Image (tube, helix red, strand yellow):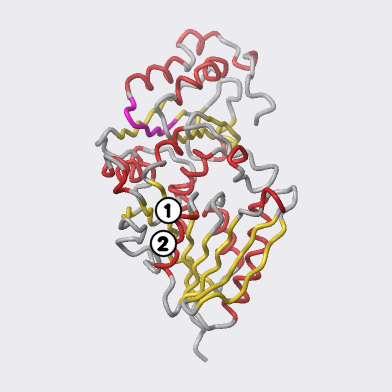
Amino acid sequence: MTAQSKTSLSLLAGLSTTLREPVLVSMIDAGTVAVVVDQDELPGRGVLTWRVLDASGPIDAGEFAVGDDCGACQLIESLLPLLEALVARARWGHVVLAAPPAMEARPMVKALVATLPEIVVDTATCVVDAVLLVEQLSGDELLAERGLALGLPDRRNVAELTARQIEYADICVLANAHRVAAPDRLRNLLLHLNPRTTVVGTDPAGVPTGAVARTGRFDFKAAEAWAGELASSDRVQPSGDGVTTVLWRSTRPLHPTRLNDALEDIVNGVVRSRGVVWLANRPTQRVRWESAGYSASLGMLGEWSETNHLAECTVVATGMGLDPARLQTILDACLLTESELASLDWNDLDDPFAGVF
């Protein structure tokens, strides 16, 4: 008996459902079925609506209820049986999953890989708006302030969501590039944020000018590695078109109060930064560093003893018009001085991050 071949799946993400539509249409051929999820009804009715269609037209529609818990988690839990049922019908060899605007690709893909062995993720595609890209990556507006949060606990901001959608994508569709003065600068920015990606343009109607589905490019290990701890020199792309990525590293720990006081200056001019840092008052803990736009966050990653690395600080930061020397000076000033290393009782330092992580 011949083993049944797996069904390939292309995931489509992006903040704009308007820009998503012509890309979605281009992904649907005779062998494709699409599941499209929208969140227009979420703020008012607490539901995510979905529709199923193929090249012949609509097939089915419905809605998923979203309670007060994690909306993304509930969406994944509801979507998996629907996808499984479509695959079981064996009418299509390819599924397109168009996620709602505020959904990140990573948790969806991880769930698919873990629970649906009959599906193989083929391509992760993200649509970005050239007109709004820098603004979306640079601000501090919460998704909730735009009515886009996936449930009450969703405190992500627009910059964080946009960066994460780009960082996981095999294909970034740069729509509306004909409406901006420097599209090559934006393409370079996308490649700095995710060197794994291929940037595909669109025509004025928003139709992609290159392949955006069934590319066979998705590599789960590579995607997870890039979306995880970003802390090595091979992540740094050459500067150009006003886009710069900086690698900052130190074997000295950070003074927690000086770091907290400098956060605003550190993220000024930085659209995205990620890494692992060492706080003096938490000498055994590996601390995740992440910023998007004007928001920075720190969290626990585990213990240094669980790794093959000595305690250190490593941060990769990308910005437009970023001054590497200025950023280096600000971060260096947050480190313990030589005299503090020799004489300070690190455990007595105030902890401005207490209760945060």
Question: Residues in magenta?
Answer: 314-322
Instruction: Identify the element where label 1 is drawn.
Output: strand
Identify which amino acid the numbered label 2 is placed on.
Val
Q: Are marks 1 and 2 in contact (CB under 8 Å)?
A: yes
Q: Is residue 193 left or right of residue 105?
A: left
Q: Which residue is mark 2?
A: 23
Q: Is disc 2 surrounded by few (<14), some (14 to 19) or many (20+) residues within 10 Å?
A: many
Q: Position of residue 51 (x, y in %)?
A: 59, 68
Magenta span: chief secondary structure: strand
Residue at the farthest right position: 68
- Please report the residue visible at 37 percent of the width from the left and 54 percent of the height from the top: 173
Q: Is residue 5 left or right of residue 306?
A: left
Q: Is residue 284 above or below residue 338?
A: below
Identify which amino acid the numbered label 1 is placed on.
Val
Q: Which residue is mark 1?
A: 127
Mark 1 or mark 2: whose residue is earlier in sequence:
2
